[in-house]
Each structure stands twice: as C-alpha cells, then as structure tokens.
Amino acid sequence: MNKYRKLMTNTLVFSIGTFSSKILVFLMVPLYSNILTTDEYGTADLLTQTANLLIPLISLGIADAVIRFGLDKNENKKDVFTCGVAAIGIGFLLFLISFPLLAMVKLINSHLLLLYAYVFVGAFRLLCTRFVRARQYVKLYSLDGVLTTITLILFNLLFLLGFQWGLNGYVLAIICSDACSVLFLTAMAQLYRCVNFSHMRMKTFRAMLRYSLPMIPANVFWWITHVSDRYAVGYLMGESFNGLYGVAYKIPTILSIVSTIFVEAWQLSAVTEKDSPQQARFFTEVMHSYQGAIFLCASGLVAFSKLGIQLLTVGKAEYADCWQYVPILLMATCFSCFASFLGSVYVVVKKSNMALATTALGAGANVVMNLIFIPLIGVNGAALATFLSYLLVYLVRGINARQYLRFHLGLGRTLIALLLLSAQSLLMIFPPPMWALWQGICLVLMFLFQLKPVCRTILHMLHR
C-alpha cells in the first residue's frame, strides 16, 4: 500500500475512535459547567491533571517503550507486554509507600483514594491501548475509544445527575470508564495470553527501561509545561479563575484531539518507514501538511472562540469572560502539536534523552514566565507563558532533530502563519471597528497560504 495512503487509512480509523469519542466527551462540558461550581471544576481539573502526571511516573514510563519495542519486528511481543505489567506493578508498590507524603499536599489530600484508583486504572489502560496500537490492531483500538466514551457518558449521567456526587462523581466516572476499557481490551485482544513472568527476558526489560526511564522526567516536564499555568493561576489568582481557565482550555482541546489522532497514526508510519531511502522527504512533506492543517483549524477556532465558549457553557454568566483566554491558548496548542510531531524523530532513533532535554527546557521556561507574566497581565499571562514555552521547544527540537534526519523545517512558512494567527488573536482580544471583517480576511489568507502543502499530500495519498 502507498505509504501516504496507509498513513491516511490509519488516521481515518483512529479518528473513528479518538475524534468521535473525544468530541462526545467534549460535549459533556455544558453538563459539568452547570452542575459543578467554578471552584469545584478547578479542583477536579487539578486532580485529574495531577493523576495524569503520576501515571507515567508510577508506570516507570513503560508505555512509551511498549509502543516503540512493540513495533520492532525483532522483539518478542509477549516479552514486551509482560515487561510493561511488571513495571506498573513495581511502580504502584512504590506509590503506595508514598501515601503519607501525598497526604501533606493540601490541594489533593481530601481525594487521595480517588487519586490512587485513577492512577492504577489509568496506568493499565495506557499500557493496554499502547500495546494494541503496537500490534497494529487499529480497528480494535478505535472501537475501544468509542466504547470508552459511551461508558464515560453513562457513568457521568449516573454519578452527576442520578446520585449527585459532584466532584467525586466526575472523577469516579473516569475511573469506571477506564476500568471497562481495560477489561474490554484484555478480552478482545487476549492480552492475558501475553503475560508470562516465568519466561520474561530481563534483557528486554533492561532495554525497555533504558528507553523509558528518561521519558519519565520528560513526561513530567511536558506536564509542567502544560499544567503549571493552572497551578500558578490557582495560587496567584484563586480557584475561580482557574475554573475559568480550565473551561477556556476546552476549545484548544479540539486542536489537541485532531493532533492526537494524526500523531498516533504517524508514529506507526514513522517507525515502519525508518529504513526507507525516501524517509526525509516523506517526513518533510507530511510535516508541512500537518502544520498547515493545524494552523487552519486554529485559525477557524480563534475566529469563533467567543461563540464556542457561549455554546459550551450554555450562556452561564459566571463563565462568560473565559473566551478571552482562548486565542493565545490556541497559539500555544499549535506549537505543542508541532513539538510533539518533531518528537517522533527521537522515537524512531530511540533518543529518549533528547526528548528529556528539550522538554526540561520548555518546562523551566514555562515556570519562570508564569511567575513573570501572570502578575503583569493576569490569566492571559499564563496562556502567553505556555505559548512561548512550546515555541521554544519547537525551535530547539527543529534544529536538534535534523542531526538524525535531514528534513526541511520551513521556518519562513511557519513564521508567516504565526503572524496571521497572532493578528487574529489580537483582533479578538482587542476588537477594533469592523473586527469581524478583519477576522474574515485573516481566515481567508490563512486558508490560501496553507492550501498548497495540504493538497500536495492529499494527491500523494490518492496516487496509485
């Protein structure tokens, strides 16, 4: 099969599970905003984000190694999965020992049991989904995404509307949905047949840990870049502002969903095509098309950000002002997507130490800039700090990754698109007379500018 068409096919299959499921969950935001107060929403957001930070820590980062080694033709697939289960078991045991330390953290100490359950189930779901992807069971992976969404919605309706458990119900719905996913994948992919501790090869386990251990701090630093702004907003401005900021992030989440779908499919192609003589050209063309699609989506979302927030919150007055944080957060999400795409080079060449170094740089910059910008310009200071941090990671990775793969970064094209997106953001935040007309002009210019690279890849996909 044409490598472009294979990438497109995998993307479409992943989109059935990922995009449809994420959008359905996204549509649950009006329910959350009507049932939870801004303080409760802010606390729930911090709790789930903290759990998402802990999952790669507790699992020793093994999920990243599972997909990379699982795609390797020379590795025994049962060994790979067994090593993943062993790593989670060791990590969770250490996590249990740390209970007294976590009990001292004020923001989460009243919800520790929920946090432990979330992390345990979430770690195993991540392992199962990564292994299924590595085996290239893309249809099963997609079906799991749809079923997980259905169960999540049902549990939300039961716990929030039926039992009225509030914040606890919000988190418990995620835990129960993830548990159903683990059981489904274990049964359908017969994952229980892939666990054999008596024949586990320690050589494979050590190799996977060498790859995954640098990914632990890398994931932590990536999480810091993505979430530290929420802690900073909550600490410096209060939990109600953090709730507004959390709702504003739901619009950029659409962009993240689109990116996640593609990057999941792209990782399969990037590894399987690693020995191709056309690898650099393939990478360059796909990257330019990907960036064009992301910029186009961001441009449209910026133009309709105010309307989007009104629809999400069903016009609820206490959330009315959070739309103004959306444009800069969309710019930040663009470069988060681009940096993640460039990180696939490190996956292919197994240079997880470089993924660690670049994410550490971005996290450090983000923390410093949060402390500078939030006191100066408020909540949008956090969004600006996040944008500049992701931009820095993108630039450093773009330069460094070319040591391993001689692709063309296309900084000039990226700069022009960024200027257009920045103009749109300023027009939304500081609207001049006839701002809608100027927004429309910027949107058309972005479409015309990004049309060529996107169409080129589409033609490659259609070519026999």
Image: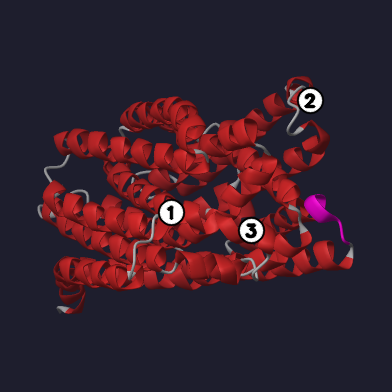
Q: Position of residue 202 (x, y in %)?
A: 50, 28
Q: Nearer the viewer, mark 3 or mark 1?
A: 3
Mark 2 neighbour class, 10 Å CA radius: few under 14, some 14 to 19, many 20 or more: some
> What separation in Å lies between label 2 and label 3 (alpha carbons)?
32 Å
Which kind of residue does numbered mark 3 sit on? Tyr
Question: Cβ–Cβ below 8 Å for labels 3 and 1?
Answer: no
Residue 234, above or below 273? above
Question: Viewer-nearest of labels 2 and 3?
Answer: 3
Q: Looking at the picture, tell me which residue is in the foreground, 321 or 398.
A: 321
* Residue that carries the numbered disc 1 in the rendered image: 134
The earlier-in-sequence mark between 1 and 2 is: 2
Q: CA distance from mark 1 to mark 2?
A: 37 Å
Reading the chain from its start, which is encountered first: label 3 or label 1? 1
- Give the labeled residue for mark 2: 103
Please say whether residue 10 is visible from this viewpoint: no
Q: Which residue is mark 3?
A: 319
Magenta range is 164-168
Quadrant (top left/top right/bottom left/bottom right) for the C terminus: bottom left
Give the amino acid at mark 1. Answer: Ala
Residue depicted at 37% across the width and 67% down the height: 11
- Give how far apart the Cα atoms at labels 3 and 1 are: 41 Å
For label 1, the crowd category at 10 Å Cα-Cα, with few meaning under 14, some 14 to 19 and many 20 or more, is many
Mark toward the viewer: 1 or 2: 2
